Amino acid sequence: MRIDKYVWCVRLSKTRSLATKLVSANKVKLNGLECKPAKEVSVGDIVTCQKNNAIFRFKILQLTEKRLGAKLIPDYILDETSAEELDKYKAYNEAQRVYRGRDHGKPSKKDRRDLDDFLDGW
């Protein structure tokens, strides 16, 4: 099975094309080595995925030809990520939330108008 398809099947990426881009950009490695999207994976291989500043490690337990439901993922990959890497990932996510706050996204048109009205008074 191709590494890009496997990464998509076990839900390490949202779409198959995104999985291919991640492998091509060397964000996903097989057994610690850079590879191309068509590289074949087998049981026992180690897949490392870089997300933001953390590196996640997974061991392949089984192969699959179709995308799996979230509950079935632990039967196919074993998460071997260290606690340090998880802490780095959580710290990065917390730092990103500080900018605008949770569930706010970018300012709406109404927010922009309110801000403009406020600044016009100065």
Image (cartoon, rainbow, N blue to C red):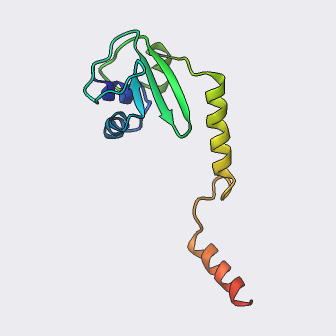
Q: Using the image as rendered, state which of residue 35 and residue 47 is in the foreground.
A: 35
x and y percentages locating residue 89 in the rendered image: 61, 36
The residue that appears at 32% across and 29% down in the rendered structure is: 4
- Is 16 placed left or right of 27 in the picture? left
Q: Residue furthest bottom?
A: 121
Vertical position of residue 120 compared to residue 99: above or below: below
The residue that appears at 40% across and 13% down in the rendered structure is: 45
Vertical position of residue 104 compared to residue 20: above or below: below
- Is 122 placed left or right of 106 in the picture? right
Vertical position of residue 16 compared to residue 118: above or below: above
The residue that appears at 29% across and 20% down in the rendered structure is: 65
x and y percentages locating residue 100 in the rendered image: 66, 59
Q: Using the image as rendered, state which of residue 61 and residue 31 is in the foreground.
A: 31
Q: Residue furthest front?
A: 33
x and y percentages locating residue 28 in the rendered image: 41, 30
The residue that appears at 46% across and 25% down in the rendered structure is: 48
